[in-house]
Image (tube, rainbow, N blue to C red):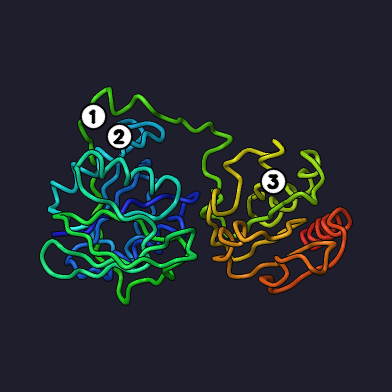
Amino acid sequence: MSVLCLVELDGADPADASLRALTLGRSLGDPSLAAVVFADSAAVPVAALADYGVSDVYVIEPGTLEGYAPQAWARVLAGLAAETGATAVLAAGTDRGNEVLAHLGAITGLPMGANCTLVTPDGGRTHRLVRHRWAGLLLEDAVMEAPIALFTVATDAVSAVSAETSAATQLHVHKPELAEADLVVRAVESPAGAGGASLATARVVVGGGRGVGGADGFTPLEELADLLGGVVGVSRVVTSEGWRPHKQQVGQTGTKITPELYLACGISGAIQHIAGCAGAKHIIAINTDPGAPILAHADYAIIGDLHQVIPALIESLRARRG
């Protein structure tokens, strides 16, 4: 018996959200914790996965399945679950994790619990779940009755904790049999977009809101994010205005983030936005309004014009690097 965990990569390392999922998976008590990684076998961080108790890594290489194909990924997980006798299949509660596990539920006819904070085996075919509802504003207790538990782990609910001892890890190159129908929807990353941190897994997010002023105002934020090794996120009004794409939206109807640092620039902090950034370890707000709601959630605040503050930060960071 085993627990299977879909592991996403952030560059050369396992994504932080996936490490959190592995931590929860390890607590289920099964003798084997296996990771499923869609990447080149040479790029799989086996040692890092071993530190989190992974005993087996199943790798699906680009030569077998190129790009991101959610239904095909789910088909692979279904096959591996049957092959390994898995009692549970889990993933991080990221856009990809939730989508692939939803497909897996449809393929297997099993229920899927999204954004879980706690999963406890309750004997036989039953698991007790606690999961986020309403973007984490409500916790739901539920019982899942299924031969295989399918669930995703809320990205801000579990701390990533390595195992007390590293596992002796074996790497298996897995070549699944896929039908053409599984590949109808497939996204192939361009070289320019591959390998960078995603909004859900980034350790630093520089957020911009209405106060940025327009699409052109995001150029300094992009430069600052690059200097900090992070990515740009935005509030809902920014996507509504068409200044930036929806995939960069932080919030209840966007992406929930869990970075080490969230720098919120010109964002008022509506409750829907706070629901998306509350998992950040540190929040710094830059705003001209001392009464902006986001200041109540910030660790530090700069009351000032972001068009003056951001260039000063960029200059200071350049000077330190120089």
Do the CB atoms of the residues marked 1 and 2 lie less than 8 Å apart? yes
Query: What's under tag 1, amino acid-wise?
Result: Leu
Percent across and percent down for residue 268 are 73, 59
* Crowd class of label 3 (few under 14; some 14 to 19; many from 20; radius 10 Å): some
Percent across and percent down for residue 26 are 28, 68
- Of the numbered discs 1 and 3, the one sitting upstream in the chain is 1
Query: What's under tag 3, amino acid-wise?
Result: Val
Mark number, residue 237: 3
Please say whether residue 132 is visible from this viewpoint: yes
Percent across and percent down for residue 3 are 22, 59
Query: What's under tag 2, amino acid-wise?
Result: Ala
Quadrant housing the C terminus: bottom right
* Crowd class of label 2 (few under 14; some 14 to 19; many from 20; radius 10 Å): many
Cα separation, mark 1 vs mark 3, equals 41 Å
Percent across and percent down for residue 279 are 54, 65
Please say whether residue 56 is visible from this viewpoint: no
- Name the residue beneath numbered marker 1: 178
Cα separation, mark 3 vs mark 2, equals 35 Å
Q: Quadrant of residue 170?
A: bottom left
Left or right: 268 in relation to 22: right
Q: Residue at x 29, y 29 (%)?
A: 182
* Crowd class of label 1 (few under 14; some 14 to 19; many from 20; radius 10 Å): some
Left or right: 59 in relation to 82: right
Above or below, 204 relative to 243? below
Q: Residue at x 35, y 60 (%)?
A: 49
- Name the residue beneath numbered marker 2: 72
- Of the numbered discs 3 and 2, the one sitting upstream in the chain is 2
Label 3: element kind: helix
